[in-house]
Image (tube, coloured by chain):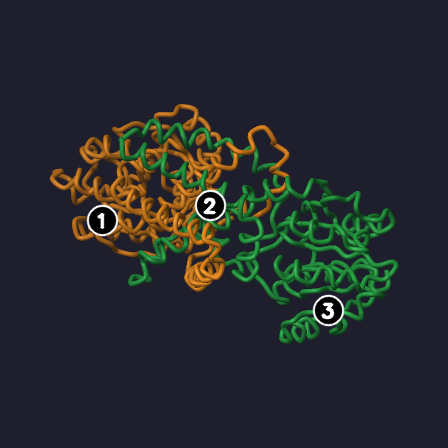
Chain colours: A green, B orange
């Protein structure tokens, strides 16, 4: 591995660069970002070796695209156009179907690997990048058979060396399920934060009453809107379906309370307590 | 301090006992619990020195009541009846108004101090007890002026020595605000867990796709229904108000998405991002 290009030197791109440098200390890491101050910051933090441009992509072994999903959709053709003979282009977006569709007929489709590392924090920008972010985390890969063998292998070697658990999925199934286990949590958290802030806007010291439970539940409301609005747009149908079911369940819980059916309320919670066993299976987070 | 009685030797009662022992190593700690196996466990863990009964309360300097709020409501009169001349009875329940009302005309009202330590984890039982749980946490005290001076002082000295930040509030205001900053988070989390489990019940390996964001948002869905159903019942009106506003906000978000107004979606999230500053003020959790 001689060269890595990172498009988008934020939390995900920067963390990938840090692990890559650890694995390939002699390789050069080129950063591309439309945000000049992110490039300057990534350079001064030593996350990248130089600020580059699209011409650098053809000499890269791996191009890692970690920008909002709408930006990836607009740029992916142009990025693939620049891929050299040995370049594999990997993205890290939270939706996969529209992107796979967008590249389906591209001449260099076999240079692209659709990926979604289930890793991150609620922070963003180059200074949020963390070494080891991907260790023990799930890397979902879609339509792997559309990627050239040698390029699959090249990317997988890197992911494995970073300690990721590889899972293969159909792109549409990925988008449908990720709406439930990730996208919905973000809406639930943002709207919880909004509800409480609206109510307490004149009584800031009320937050003295908030404990770690509240903090945990609204943590995702710190997430970047620039990243999340495009995800909700791109995965609109599946997200709306999950949101409808969530609202339905909240209304049902409300009705139980209104009818003073607190044994029903107890029952609902007890059923959901089974989430304990499920959560025990989730790779440990970085916090 | 010669003797502490703990009614309910679970997470909160047990943690209080652990800190108390550190502060007053020579004092005796008596445990009362209707769950015999919890008493046996608390004894074998050394959390309490002996299993006692109501007769032990009159010799106690402090009686700490940490059982579900409905059980406290049923027992509080009887507990106060047993209070000795120097006994202060403190409860740790998540609702305060109905309890303050229940004891308002009790002969020994001045032996009672209404408290709500904002501390806990999603676990329960004596084995979940943690030394230092209360350090740096907020202790809300209601109607302090109804408690005898010397007994206020006795309890406050203990809370201060445990490192708690004391805040005084009106009981009704406590219940109204705590619905937003604590009770609502639990419903949001339980129903999110339910929505995802219902959807994915036949595809357990989908949870391989879940990351730390999902884990954080549904953490409270591990909480004890035996503790939470009575809280929702006791604080029904305020909880329903907060739940209505939450559902209203979720529906508004859904409408923005349905109308393809993704700049509106962006705007909603950006407004809520201010939660960052607010959360920075929350005492650090124990996790």
* Rendered image quadrant of residue A175: top right
Residue at numbered disc 1:
B171
Q: Secondary structure at mark 2?
A: loop
Give the image location of residue A199, x and y in percent: 31, 56
Residue at numbered disc 3:
A31
The residue most toward the top is: B36
Give the CA separation, mark 2 to mark 1: 28 Å
- Dot 1 surroundings within 10 Å: few (below 14), some, or many (20 or more)? many
Callouts 2 and 1 in the same chain: yes
Residue at numbered disc 2:
B131
Instruction: Say which quadrant the N terminus of chain B sits in.
Output: top left
Q: Nearer the viewer, residue A145 or A205?
A: A145
Q: Is B192 left, or right, of B248 in this rendering?
A: right
Q: Residue at x 41, y 49 (%)?
A: B134
Q: Residue at x 54, y 41 (%)?
A: A180
Give the CA separation, mark 1 to mark 3: 56 Å
Provide the chain ID for the residue under circle 1.
Answer: B
Give the image location of residue B45, x and y in percent: 48, 33
Give the CA separation, mark 3 to mark 2: 47 Å
Give the image location of residue B247, x and y in percent: 36, 45
């Amino acid at each position: 591995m001689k060269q890595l290009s990172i498009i988008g030197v934020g939390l995900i791109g920067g963390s990938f660069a840090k692990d890559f440098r650890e694995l390939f200390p002699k390789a050069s890491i080129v950063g591309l970002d439309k945000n000049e101050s992110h490039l300057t910051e990534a350079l001064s933090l030593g996350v990248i070796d130089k600020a580059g441009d699209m011409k650098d992509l053809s000499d890269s072994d791996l191009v890692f695209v970690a920008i909002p999903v709408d930006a990836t959709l607009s740029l992916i053709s142009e990025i693939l156009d620049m891929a050299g003979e040995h370049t594999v282009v990997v993205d890290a977006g939270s939706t996969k179907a529209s992107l796979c569709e967008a590249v389906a007929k591209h001449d260099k489709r076999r240079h692209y690997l659709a990926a979604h590392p289930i890793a991150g924090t609620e922070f963003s920008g180059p200074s949020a990048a963390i070494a080891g972010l991907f260790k023990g985390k799930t890397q979902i890969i879609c339509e792997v058979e559309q990627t050239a063998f040698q390029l699959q292998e090249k990317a997988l070697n890197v992911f494995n060396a970073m300690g990721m658990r590889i899972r293969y999925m159909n792109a549409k199934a990925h988008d449908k399920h990720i709406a439930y286990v990730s996208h919905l949590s973000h809406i639930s958290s943002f709207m919880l934060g909004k509800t409480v802030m609206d109510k307490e806007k004149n009584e800031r010291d009320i937050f003295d009453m908030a404990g770690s439970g509240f903090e945990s539940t609204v943590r995702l409301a710190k997430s970047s809107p620039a990243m999340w609005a495009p995800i909700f747009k791109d995965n609109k149908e599946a997200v709306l379906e999950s949101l409808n079911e969530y609202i339905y369940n909240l209304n049902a819980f409300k009705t139980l309370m209104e009818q003073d059916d607190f044994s029903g309320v107890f029952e609902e919670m007890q059923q959901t307590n089974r989430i304990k066993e499920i959560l025990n299976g989730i790779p440990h987070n970085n916090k």
